[in-house]
Image (spheres, rainbow, N blue to C red):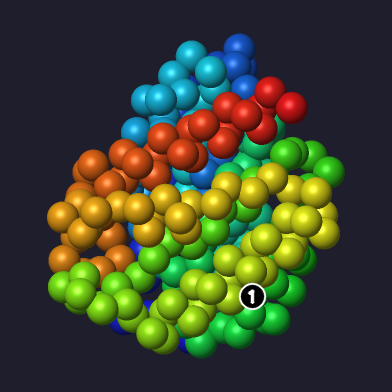
Amino acid sequence: MKERFEWIHSWCDETLSGDLPRVLLVGDSITHNYQERVRELLRGVCYVDYISTSYAIDAKIYNHLIYDFMTDSKYDLIHFNNGLHGIHISKRSYKIRLKKLLAKVEKQTKLVLATSTLVYKEGNKRLDGAWMKRVRERNAAMQELAAEKGYGLDDLYPVSVSVPKELRYVDGTHYLKEGYDMLAETVAACIRKNLEK
């Protein structure tokens, strides 16, 4: 099932350089909006590429796109955060599809799964009940899969809860720069920690 608008954004950093580890961020608009700050925080530690998209995990194009991107370069770590699209997908289906996709690359790279962030209704006064049901389900799926497969876990949900409302964008899902900076700091710290293992 498609959304009204579908989009894809990506960036590969210093592709001719191999003197540092290379990390891939896979995600949605949340990832798109923190990836630049993550790159800044990890400068000199690793190269940071990213791909973000609105396509949901049950879309054929999504699976081809993400698999091809994950295998196009040699990644030392892939940080996966894409839970805020495809509201029609059940927890069971989401977990099965994610497990199948990641199994294709788990022997070649370290994998870190990130939990999805809080979703309010527009105006940030009330939580979005339908989306919060999916967020909780998908975060549980991420935690279960990380435990089952030995993947790393980056728990971004409590960070998103701690972001003050004045640092949230009016749509209830996104953040102002300072809010994204909070998420980026957590992501960068998690990547550092997992690269050192």
Indicate left or right for 137 with 184 as reference: right
In this rendering, the answer to whether 17 lies above or below 108 is above
Indicate left or right for 97 with 162 as reference: right
The image quarter containing residue 54 is: bottom left
Would residue 174 be visible to someone looking at this image?
Answer: yes
Would residue 101 be visible to someone looking at this image?
Answer: no
Q: Position of residue 196 (x, y in %)?
A: 69, 23
- Residue located at (74% from left, 74% from top): 96
Location of mark 1 (residue): 94
Q: Position of residue 187 (x, y in %)?
A: 49, 40
Front residue (pair 122, 100): 122
- Residue located at (42% from left, 79% from top): 131
Quadrant for the C terminus, please. Answer: top right
In this rendering, the answer to whether 129 lies above or below 85 is below
In this rendering, the answer to whether 58 lies above or below 145 is below
Q: Position of residue 38 (x, y in %)?
A: 41, 33
- Residue located at (45% from left, 72% from top): 85
Task: Please name the amino acid that badge 1 sits on.
Answer: Tyr
- Residue located at (41% from left, 86% from top): 130
- How crowded pointer 1 is (Cα within 10 Å; few <14, some 14-19, many 20+) is rated as many
